[in-house]
Amino acid sequence: MLIEAALSGLGVALVPRLYVEAELADGRLIAPWPEGTSISKTFCLVLPEPIKLSDSPVQTFADWILNEARSPNGTR
């Protein structure tokens, strides 16, 4: 869904290059950094203004993503 959103012009997708090789090759997407460039490992969880972090499903997701980020390999 994230890649489809980027293809639709809705924003940026931060994904491994191998997932978008075809889209990069045919010019439907561009890479803002050259191949092999290391970027920060810091990410932000952003929410639309009407949604509050304290809303139960949002809090559940935030807790899960924070636990995944703390885990060395995630739970893949």
Image (spheres, rainbow, N blue to C red):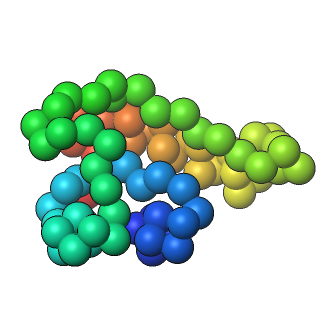
Q: As drawn, which residue projects farthest toward the right?
A: 50
Q: What residue is at 50 percent from the left and 46 percent from the top?
A: 64
Q: Image height check: is 37 above or below 59?
A: above
Q: Position of residue 53 (x, y in %)?
A: 76, 41
Residue 6 location (% of width, % of height): 47, 64
Using the rendered image of the protein, determine whether residue 1 is visible from the camera's viewpoint.
no
Q: What residue do we see at 23% from left, 33% from top?
A: 72
- Looking at the picture, how far across and down is residue 70, in whole percent? 36, 30
At x 20%, y 29%, the residue is 38
Q: Is residue 15 left or right of residue 60?
A: left
User: In this view of the protein, which residue sits in the foreground, 9 or 42?
Assistant: 9
Question: Residue 62, image x and y in percent?
Answer: 59, 43
Depth order, front residue of 45/76: 45
Q: How many marks?
A: 0
The quadrant in which residue 74 appears is top left
Residue 25 visible within the image: yes
Q: Is residue 13 above or below residue 4?
A: above
Q: Residue at x 42, y 55 (%)?
A: 13
Pick the residue in front: 10 or 16.
Answer: 10
The C terminus - image quarter: bottom left
Name the residue at the front extreme.
27
